[in-house]
Amino acid sequence: MSGTAPLSAVTGLPVVAMVGGGQLARMTHQAAIALGQTLRVLSAGPEESAALVSADVQLGDHRDLEALRRLADGATVLTFDHEHVPTEHLHELEQAGHRVAPGPAALVHAQDKLVLRAALAAAGEPQPAWARVDTVADVEEFAARTGWPVVLKTPRGGYDGKGVFVVGDAEEAAGLLGEHGTLLAEERVAMRRELSAQVARSPFGQVAVWPVVETVQRDGVCAEVLAPAPGLSDERATAAQELAVRIADRLGVVGMLAVELFETAEGVLVNELAMRPHNSGHWTIEGARTSQFEQHLRAVLDYPLGSTAMTAPVAVMANVLGGAASAPDWAGPALDERIHHLMAHWPDVKLHWYGKTQRPGRKLGHVTALGDDHAEVRARAVAAARYLADGVVDPAFAFERDH
Amino acid sequence: MSGTAPLSAVTGLPVVAMVGGGQLARMTHQAAIALGQTLRVLSAGPEESAALVSADVQLGDHRDLEALRRLADGATVLTFDHEHVPTEHLHELEQAGHRVAPGPAALVHAQDKLVLRAALAAAGEPQPAWARVDTVADVEEFAARTGWPVVLKTPRGGYDGKGVFVVGDAEEAAGLLGEHGTLLAEERVAMRRELSAQVARSPFGQVAVWPVVETVQRDGVCAEVLAPAPGLSDERATAAQELAVRIADRLGVVGMLAVELFETAEGVLVNELAMRPHNSGHWTIEGARTSQFEQHLRAVLDYPLGSTAMTAPVAVMANVLGGAASAPDWAGPALDERIHHLMAHWPDVKLHWYGKTQRPGRKLGHVTALGDDHAEVRARAVAAARYLADGVVDPAFAFERDH
């Protein structure tokens, strides 16, 4: 790595190259604008979320080493909107003198669930019982320890519930092994809920943690994030934050790290990691003094980190997942009209719309509400998101649990 | 005006065309990203603040009708980062069916100080004694009423203290009249301080007001904004907000209106108007639930307006005006290094850097601090801005008044 990384000749400030043109890059671009930085985006197409709004867009594939080289050329640091870049390409970029953050040795733990499980086991960190399974016999041996059903996961490439299978018997397992090859087997955890602990870490080693949040999933996709996690004891929150910091340190993470956790009666278990801004941290744009997007930029550039203090007692983020209003036969109010209605009804709910083509199930945007009371704030955020997604206001919206 | 304004074919959401590529367009772009909108910018050059970060940039001159036509083509509405577009061009655009917000009939009051004075006089609103002066005899007659010195202003084109002259006698006045032609003469007001009342107004007629702020000028340029104005009585604050709403209504403003005020012993007098996001409202990005930039977009598009509630008891914005560190012979830490130091020293101060070439006196960026106590928050914001501008931390920074 060269001693001095390049800065923009125009502004004298960093050029951050981000692989991926999705909503995370889009929101990182907003943060980069405030800091005077240039966000250069590698986007698969001209109509991806970030490509629609960024001045410095390169079109290309994240698996194409030449595209990655062009992206990194002249950039201060290269970082990620997703974790699908081949590890060997990142080693090549580092050898060519480019800064990559997080580096490939850290990032592999967010790319490969088997690598993560082995690293956490070596570190003695809490996680579900697990095994690498290559054959049906392996799965049966594992199930003999943990009982059926068993959770089988593809080690790489899964997200938003994709690549995760709950299997009830050996026959199902055989089908998946035949299709995918080696899998990760995990016990099905009797969990109370899912949590996320986010931490930023700089190359210097500074860390900053936000309050631990609860993430509410629907069909394997994050639907809501409640900050801070309602009813979480200070002791357990601190333990989760310390766990996240230990993992960031041990793996040498640079940038944002989200540690997704299962909360059980006894404590927390690590589910998986993301080394980038993460859906569980969108609430920080309005809900914390420093957003995860600004903090990611600060961390990968080795700037000192910003305050993570909350700006209100409670913040709730609700995703807008493509619903009834995204269906081809939708006859209700169009998107622009629904946004009018949202603004009229909820003048203090903050909208983030990603500019994507509307399709059922797709993450199209999110809303954030702030306030003092979890139930009230959550009701507001969820109703607003649901109106955008489905075009209906359901005053009797039922929470999954009674917070 | 056509009944239905065009939306983006890609996103189904508005395309807002903004004339001018400065920092106001840059920060409006950040707000447009959240709302899923496209901000199309007409920029004088490729290295203007907004052109550096926006995906949809047209290069051209704001006085060129063809450039304005290209900008407006396919846009939902056309609006402004500055008020220097010729009125007749805006009438042409309206006649061609484009929405212009604010419209030329309103905007002229922010373009021409003589037009503004006459309109306020007709409305019976409080303002300094004034007269249109074409000759030295006119100035002498005015001075006989108000006493010397007299303030002479060019009716058009002034900003940041440019085009404003305090003259002590007829000879000075003669020189200015010879140079500029017709001028506006105003009494020199014995003011306590300057205030700003910001209001947004939509075509539907909805208005939203923020708390009245104090603006601190240095050498005619806004240096600090204190929100809310310290020590301002509720009665006087409400009167100033009502005044701003009356002016917005009477003039038919669409979008943001900043009413710059002189506070005297007796009340407030209108100094001038801006019909766009304004330096006195930069604090709203972090300090209010809805920023002036988002609100301007909502207003010009006739969306319902957002909550203007403050997010903390006190917000202070300090401009970074090019100082010692912008001089050609500056030998101290470079900009990127100064930003490192700022972040280390003030982890909760929020930076907004505009990407411009550094030159002494130029508005290069701003910082915002939030908190509970005016003196503490102001000291923090001012010290941070001063460090960026001059490269020195002065712990004994002296306030101009004792807040």
Image: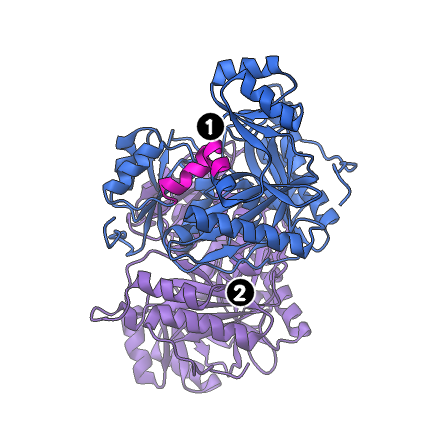
Chain colours: A purple, B blue
What residue do we see at 54% from left, 27% from top?
Answer: B358
Q: Is residue B37 above or below residue B335?
A: below
- CB-based contact (under 8 Å), mark 2 and mark 1: no
Read off the magenta span. B102-118
In-image side of A32 versus B41 (left or right): right
Would you say residue B106 sits in the magenta stretch? yes
Residue labelled with disc 1: B157
Query: Real-space Cα distance between discs 2 and 1?
Result: 55 Å
Asked whether residue A162 is in view, the answer is: no
Residue B212, percent from left and from top: 61, 50
**Looking at the image, is mark 2 or mark 1 nearer the viewer?**
1
Residue A76, percent from left and from top: 49, 38
| Residue at mark 2: chain | A
Q: Is residue B171 above or below residue A133?
A: above
What residue do we see at 58% from left, 61% from top?
Answer: A247
Q: Are marks 2 and 1 on the same chain?
A: no
Observer-nearest of A280 and B115:
B115
In-image side of B61 versus A111 (left or right): left
In-image side of B170 versus B13 (left or right): right
Q: Is residue B205 above or below residue B384?
A: below
Observer-nearest of B108 and A236:
B108
Residue labelled with disc 2: A259
Q: Quadrant of residue A183?
A: bottom left
Q: How busy is the neighbourhood of tag 2: few (under 14 within 10 Å), some, or many (20 plus)?
A: many
Q: How busy is the neighbourhood of tag 1: few (under 14 within 10 Å), some, or many (20 plus)?
A: some
The three-letter code of the residue at mark 1 reads Gly
The three-letter code of the residue at mark 2 reads Val
Q: Secondary structure at mark 1?
A: loop
| Residue at mark 1: chain | B
